[in-house]
Image: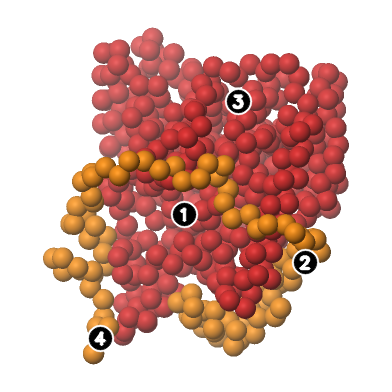
Chain colours: A red, B orange
């Protein structure tokens, strides 16, 4: 079947296939492998077929939208009207969204077909999709391995061809890292580029909606459709959205740097290091300027991220109290026990850990020592990152320190799991866009990714270079 | 900083969470391991550096305050674990 929307659309418009055929095909793939992989937690088979019929009529009538017949999946953190939404958590048991989030609405308005919602780490907190109330998700390439996280289900659904693209969310690498582990393209745009109305909040000064696809063109197309101003999100950027798909040809030779501390990092596996250095050598041979730069703050990025995201999470997750929606403990005696029992029974252990940590760093006695300190270091990280863009157009680095780990390998120790995001968090801490693209495989054939980062709102330059990286 | 049982109880109460004995020990250990690790930040000189509190370059994308139909009452109550015709139901708060 088609691995790009360009090919899909051509086949649809020339009558070689129909949306109904496409949906039937994806449903067959889901039927065949979802029980094992657990990429989707809910599949909208009948509804997707009905929607396909509607879009087929539109194609015949010549009124098909920009994404007509694009079959997409949604991470279980995106509000989709009259559909289940629970952030892979027990605490949102049986919750049904009463409205469409803006990104979802824009997909639907462009005639995309939503085929189901996808598993993830609970409230997007995790790096392996092992922290889900709906069970673990497996990497389709090697089912003894994790797909990465937190948007693991969204990655595997595209990887196993159960849909063409997925929307995920990326707070510290949750789209790019699973994309790398599953051999896909994964995009996190500039902070505020896409409205977050209808995205379950984890850490609001970091959260971004992101895109999974097989190629850069489809990624650019989806971004073009969902990005931009929105009446329902006061944090969204009003900067006009460029026609990303029209500007994917690389102009000139961008100047590139890579951070010495990433390729010399002790946690970096030999295979990923070699693949990264090989790519750098290849670019140099093609006439690009690729220079090594120092970034001594690198090791402080993850600690900064964990202080600030847990603080924001503890605040955001205070809304889950068992009163207004979702799960309520049956063992309740008074209002306080309603809160405590509901939250203690409803949240998983990693979510509780982050709430407690966040409450701690925000508590009066420790606020300055932890929270304010991290906000100060965040400014330094952001400024030093932006300084690099005075000399260079793009930063190149590994996405993750290793290939996809075995199931259970990182689950035992939270700190070990946090370190899986060591290279992906910089973009979120600084607020800049980043994209992961495939960069070969290791000795066992497991996918390795490489990451391109650009300055604020420089998605065009970044996407064009990412496309070049994949093709040349 | 070390988190002990007493401090965990205090924070857990603020966050409206309960831990059983077994989870409590594990939680304390992992929190202390994480806190030791984040305390690396003290190595960074931040004298004179202002805290970064807002990430958007543009502050407050405001729009006209136009009256639109709100979420209907029954939809707002639809996901409630306990409700009557008009309200969320909770255990008695005032004696």
Observer-nearest of A94 and A193: A193
Q: Are marks 1 and 4 on the same chain?
A: no
Measured in 3D between alpha carbons, the distance from the residue under mark 2 to the one under mark 1, in whole angstroms, is 29 Å
Question: Which residue has dot 2 on it?
Answer: B42
Look at discs 1 and 4 and give the one toward the viewer: 4
Q: Position of residue A315 (x, y in %)?
A: 48, 65
Q: Provide the secondary structure element on which disc 4 rests.
A: loop
The chain letter under disc 2 is: B
Seen as rendered, the residue at the extreme top is A14
Residue A460: mark in rendering: 3
Q: Provide the secondary structure element on which disc 1 rests.
A: loop
Question: Which residue has dot 4 on it?
Answer: B94
Q: Are marks 2 and 4 on the same chain?
A: yes
Q: Is residue B89 above or below residue A219?
A: below
The chain letter under disc 3 is: A
The chain letter under disc 1 is: A
Q: Are marks 2 and 4 in contact (CB under 8 Å)?
A: no
Question: Which residue has dot 1 on it?
Answer: A201
Q: Is residue A422 above or below residue A289?
A: below
């Amino acid at each position: 079947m088609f691995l790009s929307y360009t090919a899909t659309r051509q086949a649809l418009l020339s009558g070689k296939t129909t949306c109904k055929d496409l949906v039937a095909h994806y449903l067959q793939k889901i039927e065949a492998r979802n029980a094992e992989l657990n990429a989707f937690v809910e599949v909208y088979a009948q509804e997707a077929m009905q929607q396909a019929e509607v879009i087929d009529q539109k194609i015949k009538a010549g009124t098909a939208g920009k994404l007509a017949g694009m079959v997409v999946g949604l991470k279980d953190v995106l509000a989709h009207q009259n559909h289940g939404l629970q952030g892979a958590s027990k605490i949102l048991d049986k919750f049904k969204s009463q409205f469409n989030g803006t990104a979802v609405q824009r997909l639907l308005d462009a005639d995309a077909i939503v085929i189901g919602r996808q598993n993830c780490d609970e409230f997007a907190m995790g790096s392996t999709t092992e922290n889900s109330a709906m069970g673990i998700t497996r990497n389709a390439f090697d089912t003894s391995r994790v797909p990465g996280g937190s948007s693991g289900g969204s990655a595997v659904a595209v990887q196993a061809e159960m849909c063409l693209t997925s929307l995920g969310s990326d707070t510290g690498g949750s789209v790019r890292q699973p994309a790398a582990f599953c051999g896909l393209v994964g995009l996190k745009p500039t902070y505020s580029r896409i409205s977050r109305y209808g995205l379950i909040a984890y850490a609001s000064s970091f959260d971004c909606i992101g895109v999974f696809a097989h190629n850069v063109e489809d990624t650019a197309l989806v971004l073009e459709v969902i990005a931009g101003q929105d009446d329902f999100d006061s944090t969204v950027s009003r900067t006009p959205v460029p026609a990303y798909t029209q500007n994917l040809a690389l102009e000139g030779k961008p100047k590139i740097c890579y951070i010495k501390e990433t390729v010399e990092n002790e946690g970096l596996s030999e295979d990923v290091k070699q693949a990264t250095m090989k790519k750098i050598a290849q670019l140099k041979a093609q006439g690009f300027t690729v220079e090594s730069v120092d970034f001594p703050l690198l090791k402080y990025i993850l600690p900064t991220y964990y202080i600030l995201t847990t603080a924001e999470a503890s605040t955001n997750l205070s809304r889950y109290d068992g009163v207004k929606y979702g799960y309520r403990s049956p063992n309740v005696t008074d209002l306080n026990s309603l809160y405590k029992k509901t939250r203690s029974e409803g949240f998983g252990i990693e979510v509780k850990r982050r709430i407690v940590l966040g409450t701690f760093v925000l508590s009066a006695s420790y606020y300055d020592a932890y929270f304010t300190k991290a906000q100060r270091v965040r400014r330094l990280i952001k400024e030093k990152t932006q300084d690099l863009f005075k000399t260079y157009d793009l930063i190149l680095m590994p996405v993750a320190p290793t290939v996809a780990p075995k199931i259970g390998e990182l689950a035992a120790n939270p700190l070990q799991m946090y370190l899986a995001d060591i290279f992906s968090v910089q973009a979120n801490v600084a607020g800049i866009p980043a994209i992961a693209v495939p960069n070969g495989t290791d000795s066992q054939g497991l996918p390795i990714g490489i990451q391109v980062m650009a300055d604020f709102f420089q998605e065009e330059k970044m996407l064009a270079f990412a496309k070049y990286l994949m093709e040349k | 900083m070390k988190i002990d049982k007493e401090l965990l109880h205090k924070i857990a109460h603020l966050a409206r969470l309960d831990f059983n004995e077994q989870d409590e020990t594990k939680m304390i250990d992992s929190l202390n391991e994480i806190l030791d690790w984040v305390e690396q930040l003290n190595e960074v000189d931040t004298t004179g550096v202002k805290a970064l509190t807002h990430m958007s370059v543009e502050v407050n994308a405001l729009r006209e305050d136009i009256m639109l139909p709100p979420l209907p009452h029954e939809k707002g109550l639809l996901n409630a674990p306990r409700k009557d015709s008009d309200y969320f139901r909770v255990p008695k708060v005032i004696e």
